[in-house]
Amino acid sequence: MKPLEGIKVVELSTMLAGPMCARVLAEWGADVIKVETLNGDAWRKQAGTTLSPCTPDANPNFDMQNLNKRFVSLNLRTEGGQEAMMKLLEGADVLLTNFREQALEGMGLSYEQLKGRFPRLIHAAVLGYGSEGPDKDRPGYDYTTFFSRTGLMADLPPAGGGPLVPIGGIGDHSVAVALVGGICAALYRRTVTDTGDKVDVSLYQSGIFILSTGILNGFNGRVLPRTRLDCGHAGSNTYQGSDGEWFYLACIDYRRFPELCQLIGHPELAEDPKYSTNTAYYANRTELTKIFDEIFNKQPVSYWNELFNEHDMPHEVLRHFKDVPYDLQAQVNHYTYFHEYPDGTKTVFTNGPVHFASVDPANIPCRVSGAIGRDTAQVLEALGYSSEKSPPCTKPRRSDKPSISNSPFFSAFPPPGAGAQKKA
C-alpha cells in the first residue's frame, strides 16, 4: 500500500506549483482529479519554455507537472459546472488550488464558503504573497515573487554581472514540496480531530524560508552581490580547471587544510603564518583564493576530481543540466527516467523528491496527460451523470488510450554512445 492510497485530491490549479504538488501526491498513491477550464491549463501551451516538443500525443513540458492524474474539464462559471464540482468535493479529502481568493469566491470555492458544507475537507492553497497585507491580491510567479522579491535574483549572481537569470519552476517546485508536507500534516490532524483544515504556502514565504541564511547575511551587513574573491574562505569556493570546467572545493574543516595543501603539491601553504591558523585562514581568503586559482588551472577538472575522490576530499564537479539525465547516480536511484510517447517523442522525467519503502521507485507509473478533459466522461459517470445529462465540458480530442509505462530508469533511450543497459 502506498502512503496516500485512498486519499482523493481535487486539483483546481494551473501552471507549476499547484500541479507539481498534486503530481507528488499522485506519485504517493493519491487519486488526483485535475479540473481544468474548457481551454485547459495555460501551461499546456508553454512547451517552448523548455524547448520541449509538443504534439497531439506528447507534451512533456506539461506532463512533468501533471503525471498520473485524471483530467476533467468543466465550465465552473455555469450552474451545471459548479454542481459537478460540488459532487466531486463530496468524496474528496483535499481541494488543491492556486486560484486567487476573488476567483474562488466567484465560483463558491473559497475556504469560508466550503468549510461548513465539507467540514472534513483539507483546503490547500498556493499563494503569491500571502493571505494578508497590501500585496495579498497581487499576481505572483516564481520569477517575480520568489526570485525578485526575496533578494535571490539581485544578490546571488557574481558582483558586476547583472541579475541572476533564473530557470522557471525553482520557486514553484519549492512551494509544491512544502505544500505536500502541509497537506499530509493536515490529513494526520484530521485523523485525530475528524475536522478539515486550511493550509497554504506562498511563493514569497517559501523563498524567504529557503533563503534564511542569505537573509541573515544581509541583516548582519554582508555586502551583496559579491565575487568569488569575497568567499567564506578559500577552502570552500569554486575553481576552474585547465579545460574551462569548474568544480566546488568544500574543504570546510580547517583541520584538513594541511592535507589539502599536501594533495595539491604545496605543503608550504599550511605552514605560512598567513594561513596557519583558522583566523588567518579566513582573513587572507582572497589572497589564498588567487593562489588556488593558479594551482587548479594547471590541470583539467577530471584530474582534480580523481585526486580528491581518491583521498575523500569533499568537492563536486559543476555539472550541466544536460548531464543530469545521464548521471549514473541519478539513474540508479531513480531520480530521473526516460519516456517515449506513442508517436516516438522522447523525453526525460524526474521522480518526486522522497522515497518510501512502500513505493518502488523503479515502477512508479508514468500516465501522461493526453487531451483536455480526457477522463471527464468516466469521472462524471461515477458521480451519477449519464452521457445525456452532464454539465458543459470538453471531450477528449483523441480516442487513443493514454501512454502508460513503468518508468524504468534505463528505459527508452540510453545516453549516446552507451551500451545496452539492464534494469536493476
Image (cartoon, grey):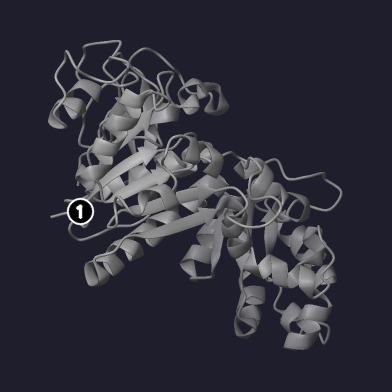
Which residue is at the front of the view, 199 or 148? 199
Q: Is residue 220 above or below residue 202?
A: below
Which residue is at the front of the view, 115 or 186? 115
x 31%, y 52%: residue: 333
Which residue is label 1 attached to?
359
Q: Is residue 125 visible?
A: yes
Q: How far across and how far down the image is residue 224, in percent?
A: 82, 61
Dividing the picture into quadrants, the one containing residue 230 is: bottom right
Q: Is residue 153 above or below residue 345?
A: below
Q: How far across and how far down the image is residue 17, in percent?
A: 48, 44
Q: Is residue 368 visible?
A: no
x 78%, y 45%: residue: 163
Dividing the picture into quadrants, the one containing residue 231 is: bottom right
x 62%, y 42%: residue: 140
Q: Callout 1, which amino acid? A: Val
Which residue is at the front of the view, 261 or 409? 409
Residue 213 placement, left or right of 328: right
